[in-house]
Amino acid sequence: MLDLLLDPLTGTERSRWAVPGDGGSDDEMTGCKPVPPKSEKQEEKHKEKERDKQHARPWAARAGAYARGMRILLTNDDGIHAPGIEALYRALVDLDGRFGGPVCGAEVVWPVAPLEVQSATSHGVTFRTPLMVTQETVSPEMTGLAVDGRPADCVKLAICSLWPERFGAGSRPDLVISGMNAGANVGINVIYSGTVAAAIEAAFLGVPSIAVSLHLGRGTTRFDLGAAHARRAIERVVRGGMTGDAEAPLGPHDCLSINIPCCQQEPLDPPTPEEPELVFCPMNTHGLNDSYERRVSPGGDLYYWASGHGLDFRSADPGTDVDLLLRRKITVTPLRYDLTAHHRLAPWRRALDGAPARP
């Protein structure tokens, strides 16, 4: 039985629905529909067609993007009621009239985010359990859809089902923005981050994406100021990177991770400049100084409590995201979902060439 809801954008009634996770095949898990395998010749022909499409549709004409206004899917991992996503939404649509209009002339900024906090859930997805979707009013100006799942679930479900249901069959967002996360996602923290995972999922499904995270200091956080810095950074990378040609640095399968230095009401840390410098940089790859407190519950049960604060890295190489963020820069790091260590393929092939198939 279906319950009727008020559609957050059209104001019309629609049903409350559940999307069952059916534990499908690997192909079904990685995209909207399983794709039959192609021969090498078919694959090359497909790539040529895709390249031709990219050359034939510069950004201004690509699906009429700037002509009709950009359409943005907004998500996060802190939950739809988190202060970071609300502050970023306000800045992107320019509710306070501070920026002269929506970011990049956006026509739509549509929030689809987890119902509950999903921090550090990484790229987990839901199968064999329904994904419940409900309308949530975050503020008088912000209404969106809440998904009772993880950040990657939100993006998969939105791109595959929710977006085309709302905007028409075959339609997709022009850009996915994930954030603004309450806490930096630099160094190896990007691996644990649900915020970053949501952005990478979008890139995997062929939609350019940006993850946005705010470094929290010891003072009272000003999410509004952090969102203002984030909006300016997003505008710069979108204007410069989404040009629509085949060599565009922010194309269909590209993902950026932006980290904003701490913004505080009463700074207890070194202050951030009024206009922080924006720098492109690699992620720091040193591990964290993990620590756990050994405790005993009132009932006598032994347990351990993670006592680190998330930015206690063993070291930070100069010029990496950790180093530059702590120096109050806005850091931008291009990310990719291909985890192949390509430089190790040839050595392994040489090492195993002629080796017996069985030890």
Image: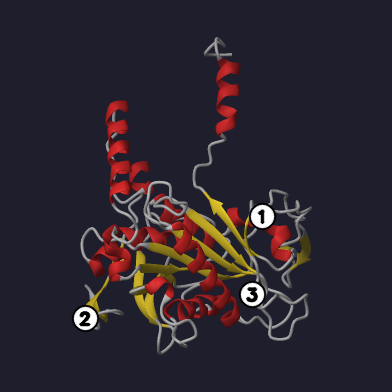
Question: Which one is earlier in the sequence, the residue at label 3 or at label 2?
Answer: 2
Q: Residue at x 69, y 54 (%)?
A: 320
Q: Residue at x 78, y 62 (%)?
A: 294
The answer to which quarter of the image holds residue 34 is top left
In-front residue for pair 139/331: 331
The answer to which quarter of the image holds residue 359 is top right
| Residue 5 in sight in this render | yes
Task: Please state the total of marks drawn on the protein image.
Answer: 3
Which circle, 1 or 3, is nearer the viewer? Answer: 3
Q: Colour scheme in the image? A: secondary structure
| Picture layout, residue 170 above or below residue 359 | below
The answer to which quarter of the image holds residue 184 is bottom right
* Image coords of residue 315 (percent x, y): 78, 53
In this rendering, would 270 be left or right of 109? right
Question: Which one is earlier in the sequence, the residue at label 1 or at label 2?
Answer: 2
| Picture layout, residue 83 above or below residue 58 | below
**Mark 3: which amino acid?**
Glu
**Mark 1: which amino acid?**
Gly
**Mark 2: which amino acid?**
Glu
Q: Residue at x 71, y 61 (%)?
A: 324
| Picture layout, residue 1 above or below residue 55 | below
Q: Quadrant of the N terminus?
A: bottom left
Residue pointed to by mark 1: 187
Question: Which one is earlier in the sequence, the residue at label 1 or at label 3?
Answer: 1
| Cα distance between the residues tagged 3 and 2 | 44 Å
Residue pointed to by mark 2: 13
Count residues near mark 1 (Cα–Cα under 10 Å), then give few for <14, some for 14-19, many for 20+.
many
In this rendering, would 49 be left or right of 265? left
In-front residue for pair 67/227: 67
Residue pointed to by mark 3: 275
* Image coords of residue 25 (percent x, y): 34, 43
